[in-house]
Image (spheres, rainbow, N blue to C red):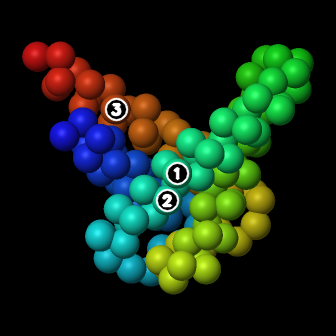
Amino acid sequence: MRFLLHLLVTAVAFWVATRLVSGLSYAGTWPGLLGIALLFGVVNAVLGTVLRVLALPVTFLTLGLFALVINAILLWVTGAAARSLGLGLEVRGFVPAFLGALVISVTRALLNAVVDRRDRR
């Protein structure tokens, strides 16, 4: 149940990002958005882990700010994979990926705080 809740949170975060960030668009339905959220989770788990380990020295030097660049790269890769799978997500460049990753991160943090608070009760 917790996995599905966090998958829904990620899907909502993607929806918010596509509404707020110019250059990030989604043309599809809610089930497709859940598919994109699942794809993002897989990309984040596989490629994100490798990138974070390789970029650890740079992340330390930038006091963690390089993690935002890694998140943008992961969103960009997710957009390319979603486009090739016909899921309807389009990421038009690095700047929209960077801003979209920032919006997704903040939205997920806020929604996860609400979801986790509910789980503790």
Report the residue marked by disc 1: 42
Query: What residue is at 66 percent from the left and 41 percent from the top?
Result: 48
- Marked residue nearer the N-terminal end (3 or 2): 2
Q: Position of residue 20 (x, y in %)?
A: 51, 59
| 52 relative position to 25: left or right | right
Secondary structure under tag 1 reads: helix
Q: Label 3 crowding class (10 Å Cα cut-off): few <14, some 14-19, many 20+?
A: some
Q: Nearer the viewer, residue 121 or 100?
A: 121
Q: Label 1 crowding class (10 Å Cα cut-off): few <14, some 14-19, many 20+?
A: few
| 13 relative position to 48: left or right | left
Query: What residue is at 51 percent from the left and 83 percent from the top?
Result: 86
- Please determine whether, in this image, residue 8 is positioned above or below residue 69: below
The disc placed on residue 112 is 3
Report the residue marked by disc 2: 39
Q: Amino acid at mark 1?
A: Val
Quarter of the rendering occupied by the N terminus: top left
C-alpha separation, residue under disc 1 versus residue under disc 2: 5 Å
Q: Are marks 3 and 1 in contact (CB under 8 Å)?
A: no
Q: Are marks 1 and 2 in contact (CB under 8 Å)?
A: yes
Q: Nearer the viewer, mark 3 or mark 2?
A: 2
Q: Nearer the viewer, residue 42 or 16?
A: 42
Q: Are marks 3 and 2 in contact (CB under 8 Å)?
A: no
Secondary structure under tag 2 reads: helix
Secondary structure under tag 3 reads: helix
Q: Amino acid at mark 2?
A: Leu
